[in-house]
Amino acid sequence: MQAFLRTHQLPASYVSLAKRWFESLAEDIARYRAMAGRPLIVGINGSQGSGKSTLAALLRLLLGEGHGLKVIDLSIDDFYLTRCQREELARRVHPLLVTRGVPGTHDTRLMARTLKCLSGSRVRVPIPRFDKAQDDRVPAEEWAQVQAPMDVVILEGWCLGTPPEAPERLETPINELERIEDLDGVWRRYVNDRIERDYRPVYDRIDIWIMLQAPSFQRVYRWRLEQEEKLARRQAGRSGSGDRIMSAPELARFIQHYQRLTEQALRTLPERVHYLYRLDAERQIIEARCPRPVELA
């Protein structure tokens, strides 16, 4: 755990938080894996900065070290389309699609194929990786490979599991970005359509759903700013890397790309997931409950 705290730049108090809230979650997942007799895929939804990546890594540690399971944790972020592919989307569909993040900017076929291979036969599976500082996918020849099958595959993402909105909800812009840069709604309708067509097949593969519920979208900007500051600290001292960290004004515009779906997730997912953890403004868990039971085929 001490190495885990150092790697993720966490305070010592995180140990007690992990013991209180997440050791039992790991025990449940291990029990469901034994009951199912097959690899399980666990999905974690949480707004930017909510701690979902840390939770995914913690579950990997707890399930691996504590329960002897073979586990991998993945981020939906590592399945972004390349910069070149997004630039093509921006020319063909809408300029806002050059910005990574929203549904439609991920390679869902690669995502589905990777999940299938990791829970399938005994093969070596390449794991895609995206460099956010470079805003591009790492070349495939540099991807790590792991030996399948896994016992548990954990996939985390800010929009993971979020359902599409009703068409009438798309008519009114919700922020300055939409009012100025998507006045006719082409971008938001495209994103909504991609969820239904391309993301649902991925969501259907997930056996257990977990959500870290932010108190509101208003808190997400502050959390995301903290994330960017942490990235800057990690990149400090790497001369000639070309890494680019967003300024506060750039981040304020960037985060507006995610407002609509973040609010949609906060409205719709809490009653749909199997494990719900409600967070306060300081990202402390104030409630944990199980809105619906896990049912494994």
Image: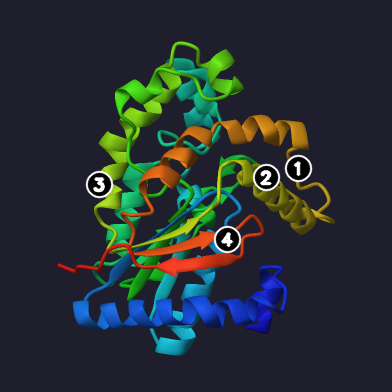
Residue 78 location, x and y as percent?
Answer: 49, 50
Residue 99 location, x and y as percent?
Answer: 56, 31
**Residue plotted at (68% across, 33% down):** 252
Residue in front for this viewpoint, 258 or 217: 217
Number of the front mark, 4 or 3: 4
Q: Disc 3 marks which residue?
A: 201
**Residue plotted at (45% across, 68% down):** 288
Residue at the limit of the structure toward the top, as seen here: 184
Q: How far apart are marks 2 and 3 (CA)?
A: 29 Å
Q: Which mark is first along the chain, 1 or 4?
A: 4
Q: Which mark is first along the chain, 3 or 2?
A: 2
Residue 73 location, x and y as percent?
Answer: 46, 66
Q: Which mark is first along the chain, 4 or 2?
A: 4
Q: Can residue 297 be seen by looking at this rendering?
A: yes
Residue at the limit of the structure toward the front, as seen here: 286
Q: Disc 4 marks which residue?
A: 51
Q: What residue type is labelled 1?
A: Gly
Q: Disc 1 marks which residue?
A: 242
163 shown above or below 292 = above
Q: Can residue 37 be seen by looking at this rendering?
A: no
Q: What element carries label 3?
A: helix
